[in-house]
Structure formats: C-alpha cells, structure tokens
Image: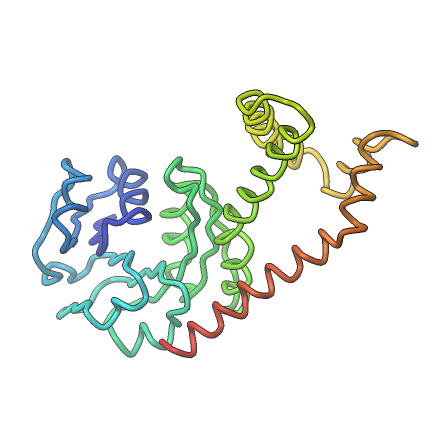
Amino acid sequence: MDILLIGAGAMGSALLRGWEKRHNIVVLESSAAQRQKSPNARFVSDASGAQGRVVVLAVKPQSLESVKIPVSALAIVSIMAGVTLETLRASFKANYFIRAMPNLAATHLASATAVTGDGGFKNEALELFDDVGKAIWLESEKELAIATALSGSGPGYLALIAEALANGAVRLGMKNDDAHFLTQALFASMPSLLADSHPALLKERVCSPNGTTIEGIAALEARGVRSAVFEALKAAFDQSERLAKRA
C-alpha cells in the first residue's frame, strides 16, 4: 500500500518499522528529535501528497486540529483514542474511514489491535495491523472503546501485576534478579498456555486439592482482585467515552 504516516512518536515509529518492508511509506513529523529516531524513513513537509494514499493518523488526540490534509485520501486510519469516526469524517476527505487501537507491543510486532470503521476497507485495515501483531475487526465504536480498556491499556495492568509478583517474591526472601527472571519467564509462557486452554480451565489445571495455588487464588479472591480488574476496565472505558465527547 501507499501510506502517509502522520506522526512518528512511539507508536508511529513502531508502525513504521512493521510496515516499511511491505509498504511504500512516507512520513510527516514536525519534531526534529523524532525524525532523528527514524533515519531511514522518507519524510515529507506536508500532507499534499496524500491523494489516493492511506493516511495513518498517529498523533495525540489534542493535535487533531493541527493536522491539515488538503486533498482526498484513499483511507483515513486513525489510532487516536477517543476521536470518533464522525469527527474524522467532518475533518478530512477520504473514501474510507477506519479507527484502530494497537498497543505498546507493536514495538515488538506483537500488538493486539482492534479495528472498526467502513467495511469497504476492512481487509486492508486488518492486513496493515496484522503486520504489527494480530488484528480483530469489531462492529462498533463502543466495542473499540472496550478494546481500548482491555488490550490498549492492558500492558499497563499486566506490568503492575508482573511488578507485584516479583516484589512479592523478594518480600519472601528471593533475590531481585531471580524474581524478575522468573516473572519474565512466567509471562513469556502464558501465550502458549492460553492458546491451549480457556483461562478458567487453565486455572483448574494448576490448582490441586489443598495445594499451594488454590490457597493463593483464595487470597486473591478474598481481596477482590477480580472485582478490581472489572473496575479497572470500566474506569478506562469511561475515560475513553469522555475523550470521545470532548473531541
């Protein structure tokens, strides 16, 4: 595809690395410091070459008004949280409009990306984000807001849990390096385990009668960990909805 990437920050740079070998990409980035981080990219000074291209908006939502695209694009693909399809259609000209929510794992080409928008560009949009991990098509922007709370914000939740597990082991007497090594190895094993079994069944396989794991599970349940996770997703979802109303 012919792509104009607007924004080469952390996420924009990750997308650039995932796409540059398969697609024809030019980049619009106003920050000299950010441009220096992608020395092999082809930079342009404005969006006048967007005609017929896929334009990917990888800027912060508050920067939307500063983005000027004077021509009609093939598709506008936005990864801005809270900026609705309605707002995008009012702001730009294109045949198709898409919203996507990749996560930080795009930096390792392992993002879980939710995508929604105009069905006429569905396959192309999924192809783009499959290039930086795995993508799923959702039927509504409400579902995308839920995905923002789940997979978009998820690395933050899991990082907190990983830190707590390692810290807990240190509290019991393990060396920091050993605790972090085992925690990292634990998280690295989870994709294979979850691919093989539903989480509830996986938990049952680990828990033996009167064993150590069920005691730990009981302690987590007694302290409301499941409820806390529910509330974390709701808080993130509610914030996504508030951002959409402000856009």
Where does the C terminus fall, quadrant-wise?
bottom left
Colouring scheme applied when the structure was drawn: rainbow
On the rendered structure, is 54 left or right of 46? right
138 vs 231, nearest the viewer: 231
Asked where in the image residue 115 lies, by quadrant, the reply is bottom left
Measured along the vertical axis of the image, is residue 72 above or below residue 210? below
In terms of image quadrants, where is residue 169? top right
Front-lying residue, 229 or 126 = 229
Foreground: 218 or 138? 218
Q: Is residue 158 left or right of residue 56?
A: right
Q: Is residue 106 above or below residue 81?
A: above
View extreme (right): residue:
209
- Seen as rendered, the residue at the extreme left is 45
Please determine whether, in this image, residue 165 is positioned above or below residue 180: below
Percent of width and height locating residue 175? 58, 21
For image coordinates 72% across by 58% down, the residue present is 227
Q: Position of residue 164 (x, y in %)?
A: 61, 39
- The residue depicted at 31 percent of the width and 45 percent of the height is 15
Q: How many marks?
A: 0
**Residue drawn at 29 percent across, 41 percent down:** 19
Query: Residue 13: x percent and y percent?
Result: 27, 44
Instruction: Indicate left or right for 86 with 208 as reference.
Output: left
